[in-house]
Image: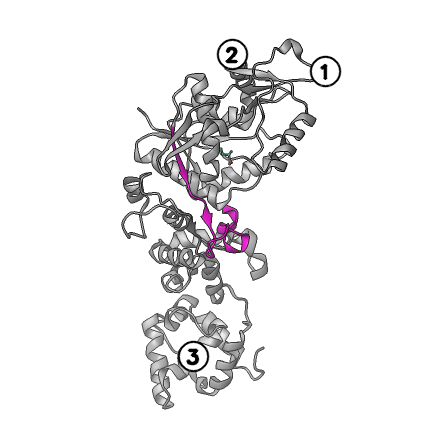
Amino acid sequence: MTVVTRFAPSPTGFLHIGGGRTALFNWLYAKRHGGKMLLRIEDTDRERSTDAAIEAILDGLKWLGLDWDGDVVYQFSRAARHKEVAESLLAEGRAYYCYATPQELEEMRETARREGRPSRYDGRWRDRDPAEAPEGVKPVIRLKAPTEGETVVEDAVQGRVVWQNKDLDDLVLLRSDGTPTYMLAVVVDDHDMDVTHVIRGDDHLTNAARQTQIYKALGWDVPQMAHVPLIHGPDGAKLSKRHGALGVEAYRSLGYLPEALRNYLVRLGWSHGDQEIFSTEELIQAFDLSSIGRSPARFDFAKLENLNGHYMRQADDAYLVEAIEGLLPELGDERGLGRTFPPALKQKLVAAMPGLKERAKTLVELLDSAYYLYAQRPLKLDEKAQSLLGDGRARLDGIPAKLRAVTDWSAAGVEAVVREHAEAIGAKLGQVAQPLRAALTGRATSPGLFDVMAVLGKDETLSRLEDQLSNAPAA
Ligand code: GLU
């Protein structure tokens, strides 16, 4: 059997973080078993589905590196097939026309509310002759669901879940306007797409029972179900925006690497011993449904940041420069940068990256920590840098001339000169290096000062120094 999974988002909003994780689990499971992951856009809700959401979902998946097999299937385009299946059930006596009016249904709900029990359709048209149909009422088609016994879902995550059939009413398959319900469309599509494994959020667990009844009525095999607990916030409550319930594209803007987010997401709910960091290959080898936990995982930004920092430190320098360049359309303007890096700056960024990436946890921090490379002269010093330079300006007297004389402009070459200068004025190295750093980078922290000077080059270093050491203290 070829494993076929699917990701089936409704395009009513962006690809949120829980959806990203569902897609990832489906992708990993398919890869693990040499199978396929299909993508189905569930756009039957015409009012709420938008092209912008479809685009955001496709973009989000691509950014996360989750590719799908074959063409995207649009559920709405299959409406005729859904109708055909509903009518076939009708012809076999496994479904029936129901003419209950909206008022009647409202009365049923009202009675249930009064009696404090869950509302269910009472089956009033189940065995009634359609010849009694009232004038002018367009019927829906309902499933003739079993009234006795149990409906069982053998779930790969939740275990055996049992419903009493008397608690499940005859669900609507086809609305009076001929459009399919979600319940019918999902079953027909999963069947026609040869889906073998349905991996999705456990908010769909009750739907799994309903869908199982439809499969049974059609005489089709029920796919293996796996309902994954939803992601909760750090406080254990439903995930809120503040605690991470954002679209995948927001994580991109916050400066996370897709591989780090992927690694983080897979660990939200799935574990493999106490291993935290996985290469994609390792994940594919290790992923299984039985190691998905039964309780909701808690989203933890700090953990995601640490993981991202780890991935950044391991990443190739040129790759990181490309990644921060990807943020410029959003963040470039406010930093005085355009939408792309000029080639010379790009070179400097690559050269400085080994020092920069040691400290940053996100790509946004990385971009900001590279400020000294793209800052325009005269630099604007932040408060800490102003105070360092204020205290130490005198200790830099004479340094420009000594640096001007350097012929070997390398980290080692400038280090020798700065050390010598510190010794000559009887100061510790830090007492010279700190104000120097402030003058050259505008900040109190930066990658190693001598590396910074080497990357800036002799002319830029001297010009920045002179900007700050000229009489008026720079603001
Ligand atoms: N379209 C449904 C959703 O976005 C998922 C349906 C399914 O996975 O079966 O919640």
Question: Where does the C terminus fall, quadrant-wise?
Answer: bottom right
Mark number displayed over residue 136 = 1
Disc 2, ligand 1: is the CB inside 8 Å? no
For this rendering, which residue is in front, 285 or 125? 125
What residue is shown with label 3?
Answer: 434
**Where is residue 262 drawn, in percent x and y?**
40, 47
Gap in Å between the C-alphas at discs 3 and 2?
85 Å
In magenta, the rendered stretch is 224-252
Task: Examine the structure image and report whether residue 348 is included in the region drawn in magenta.
Answer: no
Circle 3 SS class:
helix
Task: Identify the image quadrant of residue 131.
Answer: top right
Task: Examine the structure image and report whether residue 238 is included in the region drawn in magenta.
Answer: yes
**Above/below status of 357 relative to 119:** below
Question: Foreground mark, 3 or 1?
Answer: 1
For this rendering, which residue is in front, 10 or 459? 10
What residue is shown with label 2?
Answer: 93
Under mark 3, the amino acid is Gln
Looking at the image, which residue is at 38% across and 36% down?
Answer: 27
Under mark 1, the amino acid is Gly
Circle 1 SS class:
loop
The answer to whether mark 3 and mark 2 are in CB contact below 8 A is: no
Residue neighbourhood size for the residue with mark 1, other residues' Cα within 10 Å, grouped as few (<14), some (14–19), many (≥20): few
The answer to whether mark 1 and mark 2 are in CB contact below 8 A is: no
Under mark 2, the amino acid is Gly
